Amino acid sequence: MNSGNSASNRPDKYELVETIQREIRRHAPGLSAVLNLHSKRKYGISFANLSLMSPSKAYRLLTELYGNERGRLVAELVISKPLAALAKSRIDPNQLLKLAEKGKDAEILRMLGLFGFEAEAEKTTADMSAVISEALSCAILIEELTSNIYKRLADCAGGVTSIAFTYIASESSTHADIFGFIAKDLGIDVDENKCPVEPGGLMEQLKKMNRKLSEECPRRTELFNILRFLASLEEHVGEEDYTRILIPALRTVMSKKDIDVYETILESIIRDEENHATILQRVYERLSSLSQSTGHSERQTSNRVDTT
């Protein structure tokens, strides 16, 4: 009797995997498909399934794809935070991450009440074209939304701040074009509808911000909130991460001569994104300094925020 109740109270494996998958898509829309591809090739199961069966193996897979430093940051977003969301009581994602680093899967699963979890067999195989299509569709959409946001901020700002926003907007638009050219060269169809949008996730937030900025310029307080959000994109998997993880996927469908050229271009995009983060930080610091200066107050006329 008790054993029957215990069995009936065990979490449904399919629901657990779906929950993890949704959490990953919230932080990394598009990349979840690529992660599934790499996981299925190495372990025969999806990345969400792997994260539940062996968080340490999922962690090692990310470090193989990204390197140790970036792999750890991505692991926080697509392993430890999604796993923490399964817990009935509050669990620190950083604690789960440290345990995954140390290979202590059993301890993680016990904390989550999932000890003895076994992955479901998966008969389906990932279609490389579909995977790259989803990843590129998301990368293009993120770049386009980001570009539009910075264009609008540039229109609302003035002086060097406007120039900085215009620069980032221009490069983001170029990146979207490059991803589109890659898709066309590979004969792969891209469409923003192929990019999953989870409630409260990165993509939904970018779309919401884009709509709001198209209606009106932000006042100074709102501008700071927007800049903090853009800076916090590092907490999500950003454009540079699509680039990093696309490279090994593209190697499987391109000739070596082609991938050598594309890899150089994609590595350049990664450096651009890192520079954007630095520029944004400098702009934020400058505006913070101006707002704290004696006698400096916000002046807004004709829907334009004074940032000079």
Image (cartoon, grey):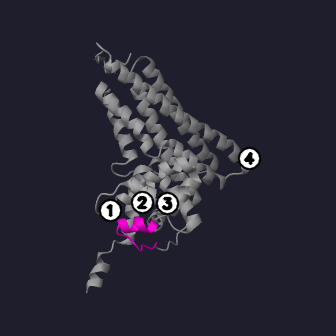
Judged from the image, the secondary structure of the residue bearing numbered disc 2 is helix
- Is residue 305 visible in the rendered image? The answer is no
Q: Amino acid at mark 1?
A: Ala
* Placement of 27 over or under 18, stated as above or below: above
Specify the segment rendered in magenta: 105-119
**Disc 1 from disc 3: Cα separation:** 20 Å
The CA distance from mark 2 to mark 4 is 35 Å
242 vs 228, nearest the viewer? 228
Q: Nearer the viewer, mark 1 or mark 4?
A: 1
Q: Residue 53 location, x and y as percent?
A: 46, 68
Q: CA distance from mark 3 to mark 2?
A: 24 Å
Asked if marks 2 and 4 touch (Cβ < 8 Å), the reply is: no
State the residue in front, 209 or 185.
Answer: 209
- Please, what is the three-letter code of the amino acid marked with disc 2? Gln
Q: Who comes first in sequence, dot 1 or dot 4?
A: 1
- Identity, as a three-letter code, of the amino acid under mark 4: Lys
Q: Residue furthest top?
A: 295
| Residue underneath mark 2 | 21
Q: Crowding at label 4, few (<14), some or many (≥20) Cα neighbours within 10 Å?
A: few
Q: Which residue appears at 59% of the width and 65% of the height?
A: 42
What's the residue at 57%, 39% (across, down)?
270
Is residue 109 at least partly visible in the picture? yes
For the residues carrying marks 3 and 2, which lies nearer the camera in this image? 3
The residue that label 3 is drawn on is 102
Residue matched to label 4: 257
